[in-house]
Image (cartoon, rainbow, N blue to C red):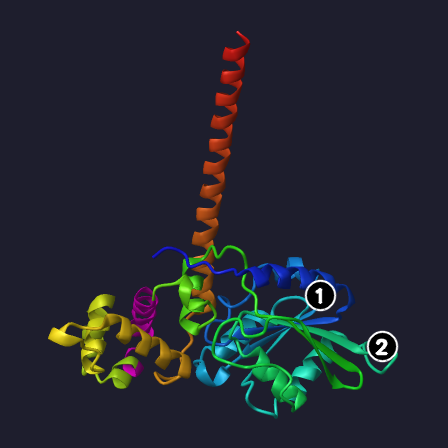
């Protein structure tokens, strides 16, 4: 599967807005999807925010694997200048923990003379608007389950001395880890025109059958033993789900597009069960492979430039001769 890419024009503007706004910001909140804590983290954030103290918020923890979330929190909390908490943005109670996390990262920012200034960033559809509505107890931000709802920066006063700037959801210009693109697409962070539902659903099923086979079997009533389920090819698994869910067209042909949509909708809604699609060790392996590919790509480009330069010099010599 090729790496999924999605970077609409408004994201270029968001990137510029963050670079400008960050000059006056004390703490950055990066909202992550607790089901894909590394894949939903923006690799350009440190560059964009000038290494400001960062609060990593693993959102939608109610949809994530409760055994894996603490592992990810430890992974992020081990970083300098970083704190990590997990929450469900639809709840009111965690709001104080989020504010306290920011205060701990910037303890000198308090009172009207030195108010706390916070920028919140995250990938599309990660629950940022819902969180802001919860924190402010008002319908400040538009919400929806479509990637890219928020299109402009918004300023919200959470407390007299606590100002929060919301930005539109933003990815990065080139996703170099294919597994990251698959997971972002599965979560709904990427616009539907940028990926194939069947390919993304099969990649999702390929992971679920290995790590969450019991939940997968129960949800779709497949009636398969764990070994039999794990041995199925991803396309065969999607076909079985199509039959079980009645995704059949005239003539008995399977509607795999419809089956793929059902799988993705169920995953996004948490209907399959609490699931986390990656571990820190998974991420290290994927990132190392991506770094190797990028190094090889850079080497190929360098060699191509050298060949182009030699050809240009040879042409110049021929013309001069």
What is the span of residues highlighted in magenta in the rendered image? 197-215
Mark 1 crowdedness (10 Å alpha carbons): few <14, some 14-19, many ≥20: many
Residue bearing mark 2: 114
208 left or right, relative to 164: left
- Spot occupied by residue 17 in the image (x, y as percentages of width and height): 68, 63
- Spot occupied by residue 250 in the image (x, y as percentages of width and height): 14, 75
Q: Is residue 212 visible?
A: no
Please identify the quadrant where the N terminus is shown: bottom left
Callout 1 secondary element: loop
| Residue 115 sits inside the magenta stretch | no
Question: What residue is at 48 percent from the left and 57 percent from the top?
Answer: 175
> Total label count?
2
Residue bearing mark 1: 52
Question: What residue is at 51 percent from the left and 34 percent from the top?
Answer: 302
Image quadrant assignment for residue 116: bottom right
Furthest residue toward top: 321
Distance from Cα at disc 2 to Cα at disc 1:
17 Å
Callout 2 secondary element: loop
Image quadrant assignment for residue 278: bottom left
236 left or right, relative to 123: left
């Amino acid at each position: 599967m090729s790496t999924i890419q999605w970077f609409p024009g408004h994201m270029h503007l968001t990137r510029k807005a963050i670079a400008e706004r960050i000059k006056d910001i004390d703490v950055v909140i990066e909202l992550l999807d607790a089901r894909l804590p590394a894949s939903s983290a923006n690799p350009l954030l440190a560059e964009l925010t000038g290494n400001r103290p960062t609060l990593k918020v693993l959102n939608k923890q109610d949809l994530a694997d409760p055994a894996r979330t603490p592992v990810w929190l430890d992974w992020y909390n081990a970083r300098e200048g970083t704190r990590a908490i997990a929450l469900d943005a639809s709840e009111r109670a965690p709001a104080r923990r989020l504010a306290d996390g920011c205060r701990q990262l910037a303890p000198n920012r308090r009172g009207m003379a030195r108010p706390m200034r916070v920028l919140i960033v995250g990938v599309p559809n990660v629950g940022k608007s819902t969180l802001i509505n919860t924190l402010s107890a008002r319908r400040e931000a538009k919400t929806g389950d479509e990637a890219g709802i928020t299109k402009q920066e918004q300023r919200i006063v959470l407390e007299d001395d606590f100002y929060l700037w919301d930005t539109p959801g933003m990815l990065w210009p080139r996703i170099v880890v294919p597994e990251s693109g698959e997971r972002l697409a599965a979560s709904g962070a990427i616009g539907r025109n940028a990926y194939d539902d069947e390919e993304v659903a099969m990649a999702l099923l390929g992971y679920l059958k290995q790590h969450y086979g019991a939940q997968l079997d129960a949800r779709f009533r497949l009636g398969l033993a764990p070994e039999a389920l794990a041995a199925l090819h991803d396309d065969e698994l999607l076909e079985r789900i199509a039959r079980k869910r009645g995704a059949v067209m005239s003539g008995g042909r399977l509607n795999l597009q419809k089956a793929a949509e059902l799988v993705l909708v169920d995953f996004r809604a948490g209907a399959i069960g609490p699931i986390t699609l990656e571990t820190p060790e998974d991420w290290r392996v994927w990132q190392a492979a991506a770094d190797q590919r990028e190094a090889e790509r850079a080497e190929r480009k360098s060699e191509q430039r050298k060949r182009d330069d030699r050809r240009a010099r040879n042409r110049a010599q021929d013309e001069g001769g």
